[in-house]
Amino acid sequence: MSYQAVETSREGAEPIELFEFVGTNNTYRFTSYNEQISFQGFDYLPIAISRRAIKYGSNAQDEVAIEVALPYNETVAFEYIFAAAPPELRITIYRVHASNNITMDAITLWRGRVTSTNVKGREAVFRVPTIFGYLFNTNAPSVRYQSPCNHRLFDARCKVNEALNSFTADVLSINGNFVQLDAIAAGVEGTDLVGGTIQVDGDVEARLIVGQTGTTIETAYPFSNAITAGTTLQLKRGCNRAINGDCLNKFNNVANFGGFVLVPPKNPFEGNVT
């Protein structure tokens, strides 16, 4: 039977929901069913997971969102609620029926980015608006009238070559948010990496570099426990976005500077004019 036929059947319906958490640190897959489910080549583990009823709204002010709840002691809760918050966590909910071909007859019930988290009793709750709701409720990027550069390093407007300012190195040891590397690329000196990124080679887990002393890198917050000695990391140089700073001295890229160097340091409409 087709998904729709089973879904609307009074006797044949046996709904199963699959929850996929894809984040900066790790990916987790759970099901509300009482046994493990294999779907699209991945195993979904049975846990006490549930979702609130889907909220729909016709008013422009209504936020179309859903809440997903699971035990507070699950690893995903520790990584995204109790620990320093990573940049992103997305949840996709699939709905299938046990009486049907799970691989062929499935729908994507919900997909969105987690915008808030909290703990209610013994449950960790993730609030997930729709993708469109999330995008339309955020401010569109705009160029600011400021002295620092508005461009993102290595983007199409900046034009600095990313490949020439990146290198890989292996981890010697990790202590919290301090990572000691086996070597630093030639030409990367002093604090060249501050403001840049350090990322697991070929993976999505990345951190902002906030300090550099020789081959020891300080990140904004620690990597996950999966990073150990011998792990290969990719590092990218940072930029302080000052025209007479890194733009000139590190990248020789003044021609593409995206700031406003003549912004007055003092507002003439405040205080006395001298």
Image (cartoon, rainbow, N blue to C red):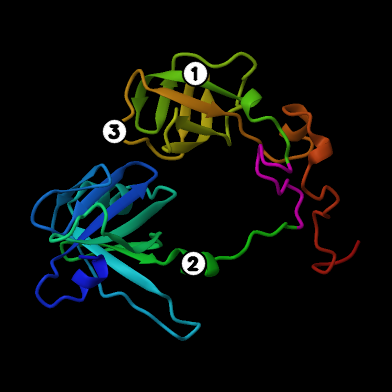
In the rendered image, which quarter is residue 41 located in? Answer: top left
Q: Is residue 193 above or below residue 16?
A: above
Query: Which label was assigned to residue 215?
Result: 1
Measuring from the top left, give residue 69's x and y in whole percent: 23, 63
What range of the chain is rendered magenta? 145-157
* In this view, 265 is above or below 178: below
Give the Cα distance between marks 3 and 2.
33 Å
Task: Give the SS element for disc 1.
Answer: loop
Q: Which numbered disc, 1 or 3, marks the residue that appears first in the sequence?
A: 1
The residue lying at 42 percent from left, 67 percent from top is 130
Q: Which mark is residue 225?
A: 3
Label whose residue precedes the other's in the sequence (3 or 2):
2
What's the residue at 34%, 56% (across, down)?
91
| 272 is higher (above) or lower (below) than 230 | below
- What residue type is disc 2 on? Phe
Observer-nearest of 108 and 204: 108
Residue 132 has which mark? Answer: 2
Q: Which residue is at the far front?
A: 1
